[in-house]
Image: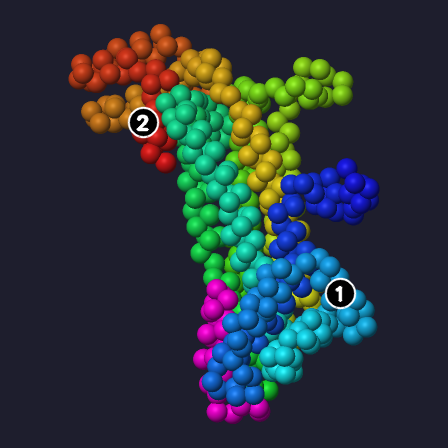
Amino acid sequence: MPDFALLALSPLDGRYQSKTEALRAHFSEFGLIRNRIRVEIEWLKALAASDRIPEVAPFSPATLAQLDAVRDDFSAADAQAVKDIEAVTNHDVKAVEYWLKKRFSAVPEVAVAGEFFHFACTSEDINNASHALMLEDARRDVVLPAVDRVIARFVELAHRHAQLPMLSRTHGQTASPTTLGKEMANIAYRLQRARQGIAAVVMCAKFNGAVGNYNAHLSAYPDVDWEAFNRGFIEALGLGFNPYTIQIEPHDAMAELFDATARCNTILIDACRDIWSYVSLGYFRQKLKEGEVGSSTMPHKVNPIDFENAEGNFGIANAALRHFSEKLPISRMQRDLTDSTVLRNMGVGFGHTVLGLDSCLKGLGKLEADAVRLAADLDAAWEVLAEPVQTVMRRHGIENPYEQLKALTRGKGITREALQRFIQGLDIPEADRTRLLAMTPASYLGMAAELAARI
């Protein structure tokens, strides 16, 4: 491990750097500067392509290629050059503008239009579009693929164990049987819905000047329909256009994305705790890893550490994401700067989300169902058949069916023989009696297997 990782303040850039590497291109300061460059270049290209801005002549294909190359090939060295300018200007967005003017000073078509870099823009026009692009790209390239891998694993477990009977435990007590696959299907379905929620958020941006009214735009070109022009510009970036803003885009779409991600994380916290419990009950064994140690003093232990790690990281992620969603939509009057430092920490929320997803997936890959243990638990819980017996009794009008079964089973175990004696004494049709007598805790599964198989 490099020295810088050992000295990192955050484990995201230290202990876990290899697992969060994919997010660096999006949420690092380099990622922010790169997207600022992207927005500034695309804005200049849009102005040049319009016949309403005669002072910016259309760019030749060669010049457009040079602009695109700087946008696409922007490097860490380029970002450092921007930071060097910022050390003088003490303004990060102005440093981007100055770097671009210098970078294209030898490209005649761009140099002559140099003052149209950042034309009519407030810094927040560049920043809000950049942040939206950062979130859009990270969601598409990193977050959703990680969620998809976890969903796919739960679906695989659902299908593999669709017909494997399992004792339910409502309130921690024995309850109507299910299948192990059905319980995995429940999680998969919840995650599928949560995934849809994350994917459905339209990232929004604004490009309307200092307080959202196109004041500067109209002072220079009063005859241009700037709202339509800027809507087209934002939508060409693949973002939703917000027509009503103050100086900042109000971050409502961001909050929706953070909340949607946190909801997905919460489902996974629930899943990790349940699977941890199933491991504790012996329903799942964990595959052994050569050389791994479960305890410094107890050699026998194989701990469910991946699910514990995942739960912890999802918790940290949600603490950050929920703070973001509660804080960012709030800004004093037309602008305050409290959003700036918060936005620089978006990678923290998504970094811990990705760590949680990685740990969860790793843990799921170690699971092996213990059919013998599952069967033993079911065979010791004949009391769960009190439900179908009293339900059949209700159908045939037998008095106080629930109360009779309650007296027979509540708070105490019951043997197969005792339950079958009770069934033999019921005044019900012989076909129903035969069906109830043939029933076991392992066969009383309802639609569990079918539901698990079709997820």
Name the secondary structure under disc 1: helix
Question: Measured along the vertical axis of the image, is residue 217 above or below residue 167?
Answer: below
Q: Residues within 10 Å of mark 1 (few under 14, many from 20)?
A: some
Distance between the alpha carbons at the discs numbered 2 and 1: 66 Å
Based on the displayed image, in which of its 4 quarters is residue 137 positioned? Answer: bottom right
**Residue ID for mark 2:** 446
Going from N to C along the chain, the mark reached first, 2 or 1, is: 1
- Under mark 2, the amino acid is Gly
In this rendered view, identify the residue nearer to me: 224 or 452: 224
In the displayed structure image, the side of residue 127 where residue 395 appears, left or right: left
Please tell me whether mark 2 or mark 1 is closer to you in this view: 1
**Residue ID for mark 1:** 81
Name the secondary structure under disc 2: loop
- Residue 117: x and y in percent read 63, 78
In the displayed structure image, the side of residue 423 where residue 172 appears, left or right: right
- Residue 257: x and y in percent read 53, 56
Asked if residue 258 lies in the magenta stretch, the reply is no
In this rendered view, identify the residue nearer to me: 294 or 443: 294
In this rendered view, identify the residue nearer to me: 217 or 73: 73
The quadrant of the rendering that contains the C terminus is: top left
Based on the displayed image, in which of its 4 quarters is residue 168 positioned? Answer: top left
- Residue 301: x and y in percent read 67, 18
Question: Measured along the vertical axis of the image, is residue 77 above or below residue 389?
Answer: below
Query: Which region shows up in magenta?
Result: 218-246
Q: Residue at x 47, y 13 (%)?
A: 372
- Under mark 1, the amino acid is Ala
In the displayed structure image, the side of residue 198 where residue 14 appears, left or right: right
